[in-house]
Amino acid sequence: MNDVVEQKVTEQPAPEPQGNVPSKDSDKIQIVYILYLVGLVIGITGIVGVIMAYIYKGDAPEWEQSHYRFQIRTFWIGLLFMVLGAILALVVVGYLIFLFWMVWLIIRCVKGMKYYNNKEAVPEPGTWMF
């Protein structure tokens, strides 16, 4: 006679996720920030970055969507600063606007990456400043 030994399997509940859970495409957020920073040297990468932000925005969780909104606004507001700077470059003030735009872009990208690395949403993605 064969004795069958029953083993009691205890199922433990899955641990609760800590903070915001990144999606499968969450690395794209950081790539867009990097493309914006590289765009200071090679201008076309900023356009690639905003296209990526538009593409991945719809499928992302809410906290990641705040990053994509922030990135999209960063592109369009930055483009406005660049056009304004180009027009005013004839009277020298434009060069100061270009300098402000560069500093503004770097600060926004660094702050965005900081929030992303902490798995936090951007607090005010609709802001014009930092």
Image: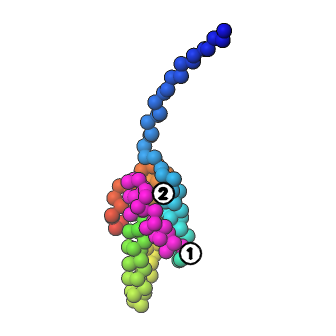
Which image quadrant for residue 90?
A: bottom left
> Is residue 101 depicted above or below 28 in this figure?
below
Let me know if residue 99 appears in the view: yes
Q: Measured from the top left, where is residue 125 in percent x and y?
A: 36, 61
Q: How is the image coloured?
A: rainbow
> Is residue 112 depicted above or below 91 in this figure?
above
Label 1 – label 2 distance at C-alpha: 19 Å
**SS for callout 1:** loop
Magenta stretch, main secondary structure, is helix
Considering every residue shown, the one lying at the far front of the view is: 1
Dot label at residue 41: 1
Considering every residue shown, the one lying at the far bottom of the view is: 90
| Residue 11 located left or right of residue 73 | right
**In front: 9, or 84?**
9
Count of numbered circles on the image:
2
Instruction: Point out the image quarter for the C terminus.
Output: bottom left
Mark 2 is on which residue type? Met
At x 46% / y 66%, what residue is drawn? Answer: 55
Considering every residue shown, the one lying at the far top of the view is: 1
Q: Measured from the top left, where is residue 53 in percent x and y?
A: 45, 66
Q: Which residue is mark 2?
A: 113
Q: Measured from the top left, where is residue 48 in percent x and y?
A: 51, 72
**Crowdedness near tag 1: few (<14), some (14–19) or many (≥20) residues, C-alpha within 10 Å:** few
**In front: 90, or 39?**
39
Considering every residue shown, the one lying at the far right of the view is: 1
**Crowdedness near tag 2: few (<14), some (14–19) or many (≥20) residues, C-alpha within 10 Å:** many
Which image quadrant for residue 88?
A: bottom left
At x 53% / y 77%, what residue is drawn? Answer: 43
Q: Which residues are magenta?
A: 45-69
On whether residue 56 falls in the magenta region, the answer is: yes
Mark 1 is on which residue type? Val
Q: Measured from the top left, where is residue 3 in percent x and y?
A: 63, 11
